[in-house]
Amino acid sequence: MLAPADALETAQRLLDAGRPFHAHEVLEASWKAAPRGERELWQGLAQLAVGLTHAERGNAAGAVALLRRGADRVAASGTARHEVDAARLAGAARALADRIDAGGLDGLAPAELRLRLRG
């Protein structure tokens, strides 16, 4: 199990490299090992990565659903932990979900299907 900072750094590198499924695997491992008070955050982060995986694979409906579900969990996790600004990240994920919901995945560049987990 990676330390939270290492898990977030690894997951971000994977997201930036266009490998959201692998980022999900890292985040899911952290979610399952996290203390009770942090599980909502880690589960939400893992769901965001799954949402990006659906987008990468052309499944707009799955992307929208998982991005919104993950955003709700991240937002519900409360204050910033491990340098994750929950409100900012949830807002960015919801904005991406809304954009996909309104226009589908056509025309979105791969760089537009990225989220910054921290900062």
Image: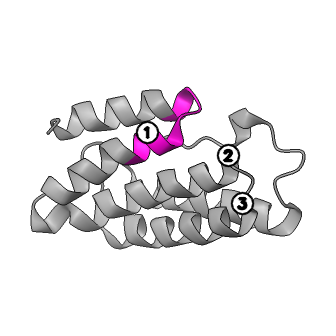
**Local crowd at mark 3 within 10 Å, few (<14), some, or many (≥20)?**
some
Q: Is residue 72 visible?
A: yes
Name the residue that disc number 3 marks. Answer: 59
Residue at 41% in and 48% down: 24
Q: Nearer the viewer, residue 61 or 48?
A: 61
How many angstroms separate mark 1 from mark 2 (CA)?
13 Å
- Judged by its main secondary structure, the magenta piece is helix
Q: Which mark is residue 93?
A: none
The magenta-colored residue range is 15-24
**Local crowd at mark 2 within 10 Å, few (<14), some, or many (≥20)?**
some
Q: Is residue 86 visible?
A: no
**Residue 87 sits in quarter:** bottom left
* Relative image position of residue 118 (x, y in whole percent): 40, 40
Query: Vertically, is 72 above or below 12?
Result: below
Q: Tag 1: residue type?
A: His
| Left-right relation of 66 to 10 | right
Name the residue that disc number 2 marks. Answer: 56
* Relative image position of residue 110 (x, y in whole percent): 73, 35
Q: Tag 3: residue type?
A: Asn
Q: Which mark is residue 22?
A: 1
Residue at 39% in and 36% down: 11
Q: Tag 2: residue type?
A: Glu
| Left-right relation of 8 to 52 | left
**Residue 77 sits in quarter:** bottom left
Tag 3–tag 1 contact (CB < 8 Å)? no
Disc count in the image? 3
| Secondary structure type for disc 2 | helix
